[in-house]
């Protein structure tokens, strides 16, 4: 049971149900277009800036995976949702500061944004008390812009090269390397970005055959990401609507 403050209004639940039906159709159509099994693609509902009541409503509609990108918002929301007796699979998808690692591993099931050896080690240290490994994806920089986050493919940088970061994750007992994540760089067409990611992923899987996950695509471009092999798509505004940013 949950109190009224954590319960979505019937009209809001109807809005979410309509949005969800539309997104599910878009994903199914995108998979059908390229001959992929719909079951290969996980939709992550990006609930950042949206209340716990929306998370609970989405869970009631069958959504199992939720995404957040700021620990200071996500930690409290996850606790509120858990107090209501609901336990979705939480994905942390934003840039993560090392000093937030211990907080994030308390509620997150997966972190998509591991982009340095130092962050991998911080997460590994923070998982010491977890009963199960934390799924971790290495965020890839597609354009080499360090300011936007992401490990660097083909780089020998011992702290931020893609392979050193992946090895740091793979060797950590509390982490499970599950794949790669990327955000299309500003100014890049989605086809260019996701084609580059698919190229990086192909080489990556040759070294890490078990790390088949590919987190790519958002509300406006996830069909293109699916075309290039995305296994996880991150959908916010197309599902939940536009909402002012929380401060």
Image (cartoon, grey):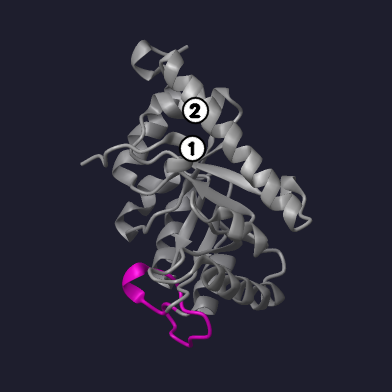
Q: Nearer the viewer, residue 147 or 31?
A: 31
Residue range corresponding to the magenta coloring: 144-160
Visible in this render: residue 35? Answer: yes
For the C terminus, the quadrant is top left
- Counting from the top left corner in percent of width and height, residue 46 is at 45, 43
Q: Which residue is mark 1?
A: 239
Labelled pair 2, 1 in contact (Cβ < 8 Å): yes
Q: Which residue in the rendered view is the most extreme toward the left?
A: 247
Q: Is residue 219 left or right of residue 226?
A: left
Query: Is 171 above or below relative to 95?
Result: below
Q: Nearer the viewer, residue 75 or 203?
A: 203
Query: Is 23 above or below relative to 181?
Result: above
Query: Is 58 above or below relative to 179?
Result: above
Secondary structure at numbered mark 1: helix
Q: Which residue is mark 2?
A: 16
- Counting from the top left corner in percent of width and height, residue 139 is at 48, 66
Predominant SS of the magenta segment: loop
């Amino acid at each position: 049971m949950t109190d009224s403050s954590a319960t979505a209004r019937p009209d809001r639940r109807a809005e979410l149900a309509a949005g969800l039906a539309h997104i599910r159709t878009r994903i199914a159509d995108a998979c059908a277009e390229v001959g992929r099994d719909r079951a290969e693609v996980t939709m992550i509902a990006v609930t950042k800036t949206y209340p716990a009541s929306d998370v609970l409503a989405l869970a009631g509609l069958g959504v199992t995976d939720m995404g957040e990108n700021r620990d200071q918002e996500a930690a409290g929301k996850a606790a509120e949702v858990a107090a209501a007796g609901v336990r979705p699979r939480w994905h942390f998808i934003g840039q993560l500061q090392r000093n937030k690692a211990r907080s994030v591993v308390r509620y997150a099931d997966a972190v998509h944004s591991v982009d340095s050896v130092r962050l991998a080690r911080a997460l590994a240290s923070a998982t010491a008390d977890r009963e199960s490994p934390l799924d971790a994806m290495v965020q890839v920089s597609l354009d080499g812009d360090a300011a936007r986050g992401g490990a660097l493919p083909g780089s020998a940088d011992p702290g931020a090269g893609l392979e050193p970061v992946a090895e740091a994750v793979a060797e950590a007992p509390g982490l499970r390397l599950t794949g790669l994540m990327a955000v299309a760089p500003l100014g890049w067409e989605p086809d260019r970005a996701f084609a580059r990611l698919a190229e990086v992923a192909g080489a990556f899987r040759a070294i890490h055959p078990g790390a088949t996950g590919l987190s790519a695509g958002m509300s406006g471009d996830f069909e293109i990401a699916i075309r290039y092999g995305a296994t996880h798509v991150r959908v916010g505004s197309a599902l939940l609507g536009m909402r002012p940013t929380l401060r």
